[in-house]
DNA sequence: CCGGTTTCGTTAGTGCGACTAACGCACTGG
DNA sequence: CCAGTGCGTTAGTCGCACTAACGAAACCGG
């Protein structure tokens, strides 16, 4: 990423919200990516584990809906998680089209580890903001996001 | 992207700032990308044109610094712009390692067109926020970003 | 109960932006 | 004059978002 004093950036680029978002998100992705790579994990892994922990065993399409991960991308993610015994994939007896994905104990432990490293990563990302500012930032982002995901 | 009511997303994912940023940025990228594609342009094209308009002719590495685009990616972008006569690339007589990139009149016109469509795109992206909220959002993002680009 | 439609998991492939490695050429400073 | 550094370029990786198409299973209406 550019490593030049930010003040030198052109005005209109500097102001443009989509660009601001993209670059800030990139920083976040970088910081989070580095944190997760220490555990050989990626954001999709965390998202799936978190969804399973919160909602219990689920089909792949349910996980896709809950995480925003595409069904097609989920296949590989689930393969990787299953290879490491963090989740298990079993056919659903009630609907043989479905797989039931469950979190293993190891998966639950892994999730806890990721939770703490991710917490620290968020902290590094938002370092310059105090708690109130962080709250308003997430609130504003949430509003923008819900607007676009609800009224697609 | 997920098209399920956002309320169903797991708590920790829903709150996580890096994720919020990533998803909101993705929405922005989608909206902006669609707007730009009407002009066969991408964000890099706009960034380069805007930087040239604001700072005047510059070397590729100067443009890279000012836009945050990697030197390596800039090559292709500049090829595409030059193919369409929006910019011109000439060797710098003072330093034969350098190219001097200049904006053509057509490039300037193109930039104006992109400016207006991008303005509209930003508006769609931030639709749910009023002017004050938009200002605080960009201010917060800018602070986070400067923090990470200054103290790389 | 049969036929059409929908759902589910899967494969394959695209697009885009961020980022690295390596190289050759040109400039700069000791 | 040689070492190191800066510049543009090529090539390639990685991660995420997203589309298309398909077989198998389930569901539904006539």
Image (cartoon, coloured by chain):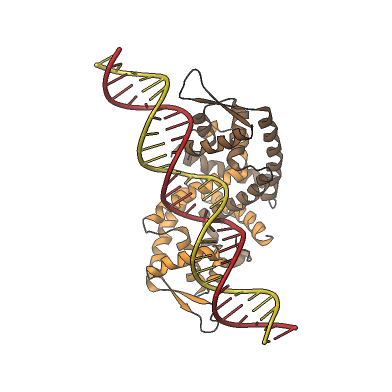
Chain colours: A brown, B orange, C red, D yellow
Q: Nearer the viewer, residue A78 or B13?
A: A78
Residue D15 in the image: x percent, y percent? 57, 47
- Quadrant holding the C terminus of chain B: bottom right
Residue B2 in view (yes/no): no
Height in image: B58 above or below D20?
below
Height in image: B61 above or below B31?
below
Answer with left or right where residue A28 lies relative to residue C16.
Answer: right
Answer with left or right where residue A114 lies relative to residue B52.
Answer: right
Residue C14 in the image: x percent, y percent? 41, 50
For image coordinates 51% across by 53% down, the residue present is: A18
Q: Nearer the viewer, residue B58 or B138?
A: B58
Residue A30 in view (yes/no): yes
Q: How many marks?
A: 0
For image coordinates 60% across by 38% down, the residue present is: A45
Q: Nearer the viewer, residue B127 or B76?
A: B76
For image coordinates 52% across by 35% down, the residue present is: B6
Tell me where residue B13 sits by quadrant: top right
Q: Nearer the viewer, residue A139 or B145?
A: B145
Residue D16 in the image: x percent, y percent? 54, 45
For image coordinates 48% across by 79% down, the residue present is: B91
Tell me where residue A132 sits by quadrant: top right
Residue B129 in the image: x percent, y percent? 51, 46
């Amino acid at each position: 990423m550019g490593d030049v004093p930010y003040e030198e950036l052109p005005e209109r680029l500097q102001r443009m919200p989509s660009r601001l978002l993209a670059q800030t998100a990139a920083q976040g992705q970088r910081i989070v990516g580095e944190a997760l790579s220490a555990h050989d994990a990626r954001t999709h892994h965390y998202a799936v584990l978190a969804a399973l922990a919160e909602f219990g065993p689920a089909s792949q399409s349910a996980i896709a809906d809950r995480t925003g991960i595409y069904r097609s991308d989920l296949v590989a993610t689930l393969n990787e998680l299953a290879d490491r015994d963090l989740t298990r994939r079993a056919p659903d007896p009630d609907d043989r089209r479905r797989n039931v994905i469950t979190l293993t104990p190891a998966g639950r432990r892994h999730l806890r580890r990721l939770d703490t490293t991710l917490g620290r990563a968020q902290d590094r990302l938002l370092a310059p903001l105090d708690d109130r500012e962080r709250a308003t930032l997430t609130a504003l982002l949430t509003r923008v996001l819900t607007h676009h995901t609800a009224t697609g």
